[in-house]
Amino acid sequence: MADKGFTIGDLLAKKAAFLQIPPFLANKGQFSAEEVQLTKTIARARIHVERAIGRVKQFHILDPVVPISLNATISSIFRVCCFLSNLHPPLVK
């Protein structure tokens, strides 16, 4: 899931994933009914994604500048923050 303008769909396809972005209005004037529904669906899911990201950020472990010497372990540190955020109550009831 990403904002409009991310053109990494081809890179994700190599990993058997796809990019979910809201439809573009471009020069059409207005969205079709299907595009409106898709935009609403993506917006509903996006709220939960942003909340999950906020939970990971609350640990403030990655706030300061990370020394280059931690380059090999920063991924593991981030993963632990994600695991810890999963111990909170569910985002969606």
Image (cartoon, rainbow, N blue to C red):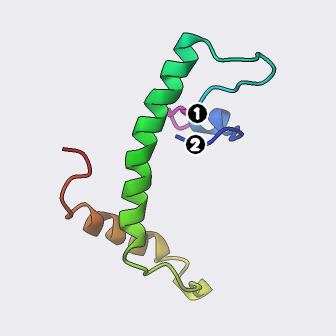
Residue 17 percent coordinates (x, y): 50, 34
The C terminus lies in quadrant: top left
The quarter of the picture where residue 9 lies is top right
| Farthest top residue in view | 33
Q: Residue at x 56, y 34 (%)?
A: 19
Query: Residue, x 81% and y 20% (percent of image)?
Result: 27
Which residue is tagged 1? Answer: 21
- Magenta portion: prevailing SS class: loop
With respect to residue 59, does 51 lie above or below?
above
Q: Residues within 10 Å of mark 2 (few under 14, many from 20)?
A: few
Query: Which amino acid type corresponds to the residue marked 2 in the rendered image?
Result: Ala
Q: Are marks 1 and 2 in contact (CB under 8 Å)?
A: yes
Q: Residue furthest right?
A: 27
Highlighted range, magenta: 15-20
Q: Amino acid at mark 1?
A: Ile
Residue 64: horizontal and vertical position, in percent? Answer: 55, 86
Q: Which residue shows up at 48% across the image and 20% down it?
A: 37
Q: Can residue 35 be spotted in the picture? A: yes
The vertical placement of 25 against 14, above or below, is above
Q: In 3D space, how far apart are the residues under numbered discs 1 and 2 (Cα atoms)?
A: 5 Å
* Side of 85 where 67 appears, left or right: right
Would you place residue 41 above or below residue 61 in this image? above
Q: What kind of element bears circle 2?
A: loop
Q: Position of residue 10 (x, y in %)?
A: 66, 33
Image disc number at residue 40: none
Q: Quadrant of residue 65?
A: bottom right
Report which residue position mark 2 lands on.
2
